[in-house]
C-alpha cells in the first residue's frame, strides 16, 4: 500500500494555496467546502477568487511564495503552472513537516487528493496513487451511479440515533444486525429519499421498541426503457441492485436484466397472446405475495410503467392491499426508439404536436377519433400496431391524411440489432408484414428528416426503404 488513506478535518484550520488560476480555483472551492481557513498566494487570480476575497471567505496574499508563509499552516497545495515553483513549495513544506500536494506532480506530494464521491457524511474516495487519475475518475463515475443521492441524509439521521441504539442493543453483533435490517430490509431509506424523515424516524423507533427489525415489503415499478441499458435512470439501477425479487416483462432487454442483483429471484411475467387478463391477474398476485413476505420487489417494465404498461392498474392493486409502492419512470419507446432512429417527434416546420396511441386491441372496438388522428402537422406514434397496420392506414387515409405521408417502422429500437423501414402511409401494411417485433410505428412528415439526422448506426442494423 503506497499511501495510507485518511480523511482530514480542515474545519477552521489554516491551509495555504499557491496559485490563482483555474486549477487553483477548483482546489480552493473544495477546500472552502471543507471549512478550511484559506490563504491564497498569487499575484493574479480569477474573478471567482476575487469574489471569495470580497466576501472574506479567503485571504489574498499578493506576493511571491516564501517558506515563511508556511508558519502555522496545517497543509499546503501548490497549483501553479510552474513546475519549478511547485517543487519549491513542496521542498519548503517538507522542511517544515507540513503536508503538501502539488497538482499533477506525484513526486512532489506528501498527500494526494482522490477522486471523491460526496454524499456527506458518506464519502467514498478512489485513488490510483497518482498513476492514473483519469481512470480513478472513471471508477468514481461507475460507483456513483450505485449510491442514492439521499444516502448522506440517511447516514446523518442514523447518526443522531446511534446512542439510543447502543443503549438498546448491548452487543456489537446485535447493533450490526439492527442497522443492516434498517438500511437493507425496511422502508427507512425510501422514507428518507422521499423527504419524509418523520416517517423514517418513526420506523426506527418502532424497531427499537420491538427490539427486533420490522420487515416490511414494498414494490417499485421500474421503467426499463426501450432496450439500451445505458438509458436506465440512476434510480432504476439502484432499485434493481436493491431488489430481492424482480418480476420482468418480455420486452425487457437481456442487457438490462444483467444489471439485476446476482442473488435476486428473477421471474418472467411476459404477456401471452390471447391470455392477457389471466396473466395480468397472476402478476398482480405475485406482487402482493412477495411484498407481504417482506421482500423488496422490483416490477421491471419495458419503456415507462405508466405508458401502455398497466402500471396504473398494478399500483391500484398494491394500494388496495396496503402495500407501499414507488414508481421510477423510464424512457418510453416512443421517445427512445425515435431518437435512436433520428426522427424528431416535433419540428417547427413539420409537426407541432405528437400523439401516442396503441394499436394492440381491435380498432373496431376502440373509440379512436380518426379525424383527430388524421390531422396534418402532427406526428402519430403507434405502439403494438403492426398487426393492425392495414386498418390504421386505411382509416387515416379515409379521414384525410395524405396517402404519401412518410412513415417508419422501428424494430428493436435502441438495441444493436435495431432496424428502420421507411415508406409512405399507403405502404404501411406491407412494411409491417416484414418488420421484426417489438416494433414502433411513426407516421408524419418528421420521418423525412431521418435521412439527414440518423446518427445511431449499429453494424448489424439495416435500413429498408420502400419506393413510392
Image (tube, rainbow, N blue to C red):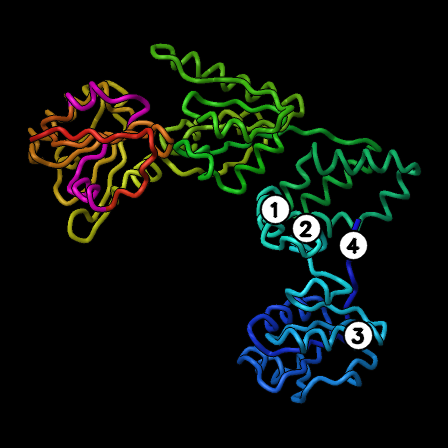
The quarter of the image holding the C terminus is top left
Q: Specify few, some or many for label 3: CA neighbours under 10 Å numbering under 14, 14-19, or 20 or more.
A: many
Q: Secondary structure at mark 4?
A: loop
Task: Give 43 or 349, whichever is nearer the viewer.
Answer: 43
Disc 4 or disc 2, which is closer to the eye? 4
Q: Which residues are magenta?
A: 429-452
Measured Cα–Cα span from mark 4 to mark 3: 18 Å
Displayed quadrant of residue 326: top right
Q: Secondary structure at mark 2?
A: strand
Q: Specify few, some or many for label 2: CA neighbours under 10 Å numbering under 14, 14-19, or 20 or more.
A: some
Please report the residue visible at 15 percent of the width from the left and 21 percent of the height from the top.
Answer: 430
Please say if the residues under marks 4 and 3 sit with CB atoms less than 8 Å apart. no
Q: Secondary structure at mark 3?
A: helix
For mark 4, what is the residue? 3
Measured Cα–Cα span from mark 1 to mark 2: 7 Å
Please say if the residues under marks 4 and 2 sit with CB atoms less than 8 Å apart. no
Amino acid at each position: 500500500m503506497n499511501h495510507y488513506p485518511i480523511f482530514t478535518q480542515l474545519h477552521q484550520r489554516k491551509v495555504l494555496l499557491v496559485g490563482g488560476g483555474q486549477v487553483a480555483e477548483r482546489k480552493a472551492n473544495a477546500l472552502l467546502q471543507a471549512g478550511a481557513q484559506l490563504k491564497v498566494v498569487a499575484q493574479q487570480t480569477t474573478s471567482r477568487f476575487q469574489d471569495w476575497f470580497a466576501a472574506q471567505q479567503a485571504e489574498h496574499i499578493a506576493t511571491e511564495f516564501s517558506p515563511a508563509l508556511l508558519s502555522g499552516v496545517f497543509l499546503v497545495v501548490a497549483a501553479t503552472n510552474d513546475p519549478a515553483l511547485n517543487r519549491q513549495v513542496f521542498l519548503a513544506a517538507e522542511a517544515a513537516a507540513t503536508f503538501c500536494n502539488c497538482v499533477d506532480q506525484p513526486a512532489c506530494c506528501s498527500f494526494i487528493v482522490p477522486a471523491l464521491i460526496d454524499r456527506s457524511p458518506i464519502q467514498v474516495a478512489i485513488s490510483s496513487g497518482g498513476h492514473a487519475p483519469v481512470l480513478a475518475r472513471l471508477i468514481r463515475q461507475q460507483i456513483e451511479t450505485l449510491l442514492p443521492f439521499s444516502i448522506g441524509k440517511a447516514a446523518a439521521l442514523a447518526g443522531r440515533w446511534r446512542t439510543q441504539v447502543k443503549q438498546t442493543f448491548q452487543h456489537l453483533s446485535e447493533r450490526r444486525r439492527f442497522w443492516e435490517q434498517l438500511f437493507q430490509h425496511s422502508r427507512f431509506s425510501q422514507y428518507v429519499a422521499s423527504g419524509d424523515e418523520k416517517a423514517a424516524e418513526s420506523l426506527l423507533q418502532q424497531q427499537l421498541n420491538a427490539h427486533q427489525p420490522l420487515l416490511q415489503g414494498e414494490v417499485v415499478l421500474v421503467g426499463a426503457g426501450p432496450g439500451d441499458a445505458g438509458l436506465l435512470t440512476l434510480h432504476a439501477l439502484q432499485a434493481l441492485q436493491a431488489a430481492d425479487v424482480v418480476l420482468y416483462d418480455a420486452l425487457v432487454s437481456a442487457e438490462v436484466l444483467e444489471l439485476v442483483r446476482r442473488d435476486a429471484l428473477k421471474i418472467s411475467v411476459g404477456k401471452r397472446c390471447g391470455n392477457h387478463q389471466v396473466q395480468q391477474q397472476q402478476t398482480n398476485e405475485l406482487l402482493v405475495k412477495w411484498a407481504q413476505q417482506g421482500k423488496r420487489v422490483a416490477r421491471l417494465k419495458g419503456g415507462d410503467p405508466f405508458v401502455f404498461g398497466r402500471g396504473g392498474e398494478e399500483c391500484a392493486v398494491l394500494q388496495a392491499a396496503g402495500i407501499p409502492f414507488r414508481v421510477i419512470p423510464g424512457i418510453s419507446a416512443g421517445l427512445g426508439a425515435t431518437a435512436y432512429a433520428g426522427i424528431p417527434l416535433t419540428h417547427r416546420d413539420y409537426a407541432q404536436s405528437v400523439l401516442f396511441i396503441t394499436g394492440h386491441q381491435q380498432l373496431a372496438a376502440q373509440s379512436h377519433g380518426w379525424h383527430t388522428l388524421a390531422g396534418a402537422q402532427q406526428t402519430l406514434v403507434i405502439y403494438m400496431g403492426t398487426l393492425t397496420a392495414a386498418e390504421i392506414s386505411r382509416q387515416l387515409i379515409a379521414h384525410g391524411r395524405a396517402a404519401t405521408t412518410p412513415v417508419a417502422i422501428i424494430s428493436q429500437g435502441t438495441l444493436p440489432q435495431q432496424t428502420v423501414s421507411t415508406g409512405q402511409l399507403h405502404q404501411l401494411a406491407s412494411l409491417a408484414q416484414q418488420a421484426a417485433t417489438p416494433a414502433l410505428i411513426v407516421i408524419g412528415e418528421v420521418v423525412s428528416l431521418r435521412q439527414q439526422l440518423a446518427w445511431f448506426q449499429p453494424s448489424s442494423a439495416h435500413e429498408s426503404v420502400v419506393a413510392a
